[in-house]
Structure formats: C-alpha cells, structure tokens
Image (tube, rainbow, N blue to C red):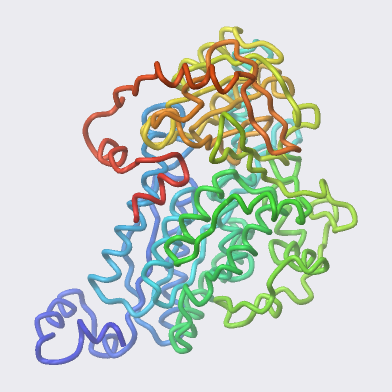
Amino acid sequence: MRSDAVKKGMQQAPHRSLFNALGYTEEELERPLVGIVSSHNEIVPGHMNLDKIVEAVKMGVAMAGGTPIVFPAIAVCDGIAMGHVGMKYSLVTRDLIADSTECMALAHQFDALVMVPNCDKNVPGLLMAAARLNIPTIFVSGGPMMAGRVHGKKRSLSSMFEAVGSYSAGTMSEDEVREYERRVCPTCGSCSGMYTANSMNCLTEALGMGLPGNGTIPAVYSDRIKLAKHAGMQVMELLRRDIKPQDIMTEKAFLNALTIDMALGCSTNSMLHLPAIAHEAGVDLNVDIANEVSARTPNLCHLAPAGPTYMEDLNEAGGVYAVMNELTKKNLLYTDLITVTGKTVGENISGCEIRDKEVIRPLDNPYSQTGGLAILKGNIAPDSAVVKRSAVVPEMMQHEGPARVFDCEEDAIAAIKEGKIVSGDVVVIRYEGPKGGPGMREMLNPTSAIAGMGLGSSVALITDGRFSGASRGASIGHVSPEAAVGGPIALIEEGDIIQIDIDANSLNVKVSDEELAARRAKWQPREPKITSGYLARYAGLVTSGNRGAILEIKK
C-alpha cells in the first residue's frame, strides 16, 4: 500500500506516534488509508450539507474495509461573490483547490481518495487534482437544490438576478423582489438550473468518475446519502482493482463528456474546465473540436435558464444515463470505456430509458439538431469565444448592431440601469479576462440586468470575462485573446458595427484590417487593477488569452 510509507517499519515509528495522537488504532492502520476531500463550509448553500455526505462516505469506506480520513478543500459561492471584487477570486480558486489537494494527498500518502465537491470551481478543481495524482478516486457531489416556486411557477437563482433588473426597469416592486428573495432558493444544494455546478457534476458522471445520479439526485433526497455510502464502498473496489483516474479519463471519455455537454446544454464554463482537467490527465482537448461535436449532437434538454425544467425534473426523467443511452442510438458515444462503477459506459447505461419526453427529448424530436454550445471565431476572437446557443432566442442567432464599449462590468451595469442601452445594441465588456480582471469575472449581473430591462431578445453582450450557465440570450464570453494581452476586443471603438452569426460560428467587427492595425499601433497596455496579493501573482502567470491562460499556469 502507498500508505505503508507512513505506517510500516522502524523508520516510521515517529509517524505511528502521530497517528496514535490522532486516536487511530493498530487495526485501523492495517487498513488502506482513504482520504476524503470535504468541501463543506457554512457560506455556500451547495456545500452546507456536505458534512452529511462526508459522514455517509466515511461509513461506506469503513464498511468496505478502509480507514476514512477527512481533510478540507476551500469553496467560494459564486452567487455571493457576484458583482464585486469577490468574483475576481472565484475562478482562481480552482487552481488553489487542485494544488492544495495534491499537497495533502501526497504529503500523507493516501491509498485512495473520495472527492466531495458540489459547486462551480470545486468540481473541476478536484477533477484536476484526481487526474494529476492518479490514485484510485471516486466523486460524490452534494446534489442540486430544489427549484423555488413564486406564484405557482418554478424559479431559480437566475430568476432572482433578473428580478433585480426588472426592479431597475420599474416593472417589479420592491415587495415583489422580496417575494422572489424568500422563495427562489428554498433548500441547500447547487442552484437548481443547468448552471456551472450542475453542469460539471453531470459531466463528472459522463466522464465516468461518479456513480449514477451523481449529477441529478437532489441534495435533500435520502438517495443522496445512499449514493455517498455506495461511493465510499466503491472506492475500495477501485483500490482493489487498481483502477485509476487516468484509466477512466481518457481522450474518448472527454469526447463523451463534450457530447453530453452538447446534449444537456451545459454552462459555457465547461469550455474552460474540460480542457484544464484533460490537460492534467495528459489529454490535449482543444475546444475547437466543440463545433464538430455539436454538429453531430442534438440538444435534448432545455433546463433553466434555457427552458422551464430544472435538475429535479432531469432526475425524474432518467438523469444523465438516460440522455447517454438515447445518444447511443446514433452511435454518438464510446461505450467500451471503464468507469468508477467498475463497469463500462455501455453496461452502466443499458436499459436507462427516458421517463419524461418533455424534459429529455428523444432523438427524433430534439430542441435542435446541433448542440447547446457553440465556439465562435472572427476578427474579434481569433482564438475563440463561447456562447450557450441553447439559451439564445431564434431572433438573436444572427445579430448586427453598434458596439457600446465598457472597460469593466460596473460601468456596463450602470449604463444598462440608466437606460442608455437600447434595442439592437451590442454591449462589449473588456479587460475582465484572467489577466485583465484579473481573475476573469462571471457576468451574470449585466446579462440579468439586460433581461430585466426587457432587452434579452434584442441586445447582445460580448466579454473577455465569463458568462455563467445561468446567463441567457446572446451572451458571448471567453473572448480570446483577452484585451489585456492586446486581443482585438481591446481595439473595438464605440459605435463600431458588430456582426454575430451563431449558426455560422462567427463573431466580427465591421472594421478593415488596415484600420485594426492602425488602432493596434496606438494601443497601450493598461496598468493592472490589483497590484498585490494572490490575484496579482495569478495575473503575473497569465501570458495569453482565456482558456490557454488558465492551462498555462500549470505548464
């Protein structure tokens, strides 16, 4: 066992004395040491129940003959961090989580790991750590929140942000906003739509790193506790069979995940996280392949904010496995890949049929013949930009309008609230990328303000920051290269005509190459907004545009 390095032999007598100080018995030290990475805290609604999940995992590990040992991972609530300097710290925690988990796992020589994340950056951060460490590992998330209900209709956190925009527009009273405030987030769990947390938990299942139901069983269901016990038991089977993350997270597994991403209509943030996880697993996943995958993958789900259904509905309709099984009818998945169940993808999903064809549409009646995400390119985004096409209304799939240019999120929101943005405009928010932010903030506030003002079907937004899975409309984010490194988005001027064609995967400004070159010659880099602390060190490591920049930190 790996843990013999801290348990066996005369040289390890001091180590054993410290285990003795912890209260471990000789019998426990004879067993494999299983690290349980707990993201529990009391500031993230998706993590407040993880202490219960961890206790269930511990029981499962012990039942199967292991010694469970818990250590923590940090977690940021993106909703609470939204709209102020805190959002600059969200994405960067992903790398902190991966790094600190690596440190703990190797310093203490655990034989296996159970990862217990739930929200936006913990899931990819821990998947990165699992791939990097490559010791037997299984994931069990905390599960999604139940949808709220306001005036008899299901609602979620994105409804809350849009309610604030409606208040600013004068179409909703303060009392009505308070009603939303009390009701849209009724339970613990990751927010109830197909936002980043739920996207990544579902993709963990699709990758083969979580048991069935990992992405969809609601946080408040007893089945979630049972799932955690089974995860604890199953990690011991993975250890016995020496099945490691890199045996599971192969290139074909990532292609499966990207296919499921398209079918579910996941968050645009998955285009940041999947390549980073793949990088740690030794797989080169260039998201340029996303359009190729999208072209052959129908979009089968319109979960909030793209539609009126929620994670609880997806769970009842058959969950991720039902979506996967449906896709195999067009031979869209690799089914011979090993997973944490100890079985292949094909064995896992056999017989998992759709139970509600309004929540998960069959192949002969998809929402669209192409997937839920699209990668755009053009003279604004030579490398890439990402849009959640499943959440774009048909009339905005092609759009042309004048640029309204802002160099930070706050200025854009102020203009929106003051009524300075009108139908047809294209809001451009730049210097919000990994280096320019620094930290690549998520732009749910401006998208929600636009929707709340009744402009969601007539105004587009473009940024070198990120758009959330909770965003809807023609919200195009992750523009790369970012403005801070001289990307063309830095050269757009007020009133320039922006052309968006999502069907053609293009994003351009109607300015000649000669004019752009002249503007580039005059462009001057901006001074960083944060000059000390962790964010400054993070920004100093960023030398290129968005998704490449995130990976570059680890190279």
Residue 69 visible in rendering: yes
Q: Position of residue 436 (x, y in %)?
A: 38, 30
| In the image: residue 111, left or right of residue 223 | left
Along the viewing direction, whichever of 474 and 360 lies nearer the viewer = 474
Q: Position of residue 125 (x, y in %)?
A: 42, 56
Residue 165 visible in rendering: no
User: Compared to 326, does 262 lie above or below?
Assistant: above
Seen at 60% across and 52% down, the residue is 199
User: Compared to 150, does 119 lie above or below?
Assistant: below
Q: Quadrant of residue 135?
A: bottom left
> In the picture, which quadrant includes the C terminus?
bottom left
Q: Residue furthest right?
A: 364
> In the picture, which quadrant includes the N terminus?
bottom left
Q: Quadrant of residue 540?
A: top left
Q: Residue furthest front?
A: 514
Q: Quadrant of residue 258?
A: bottom right
User: Compared to 148, does 365 lie above or below?
Assistant: below
Q: Position of residue 36 (x, y in %)?
A: 38, 69
| In the image: residue 199, left or right of residue 61 | right
Along the viewing direction, whichever of 246 and 516 lies nearer the viewer = 516
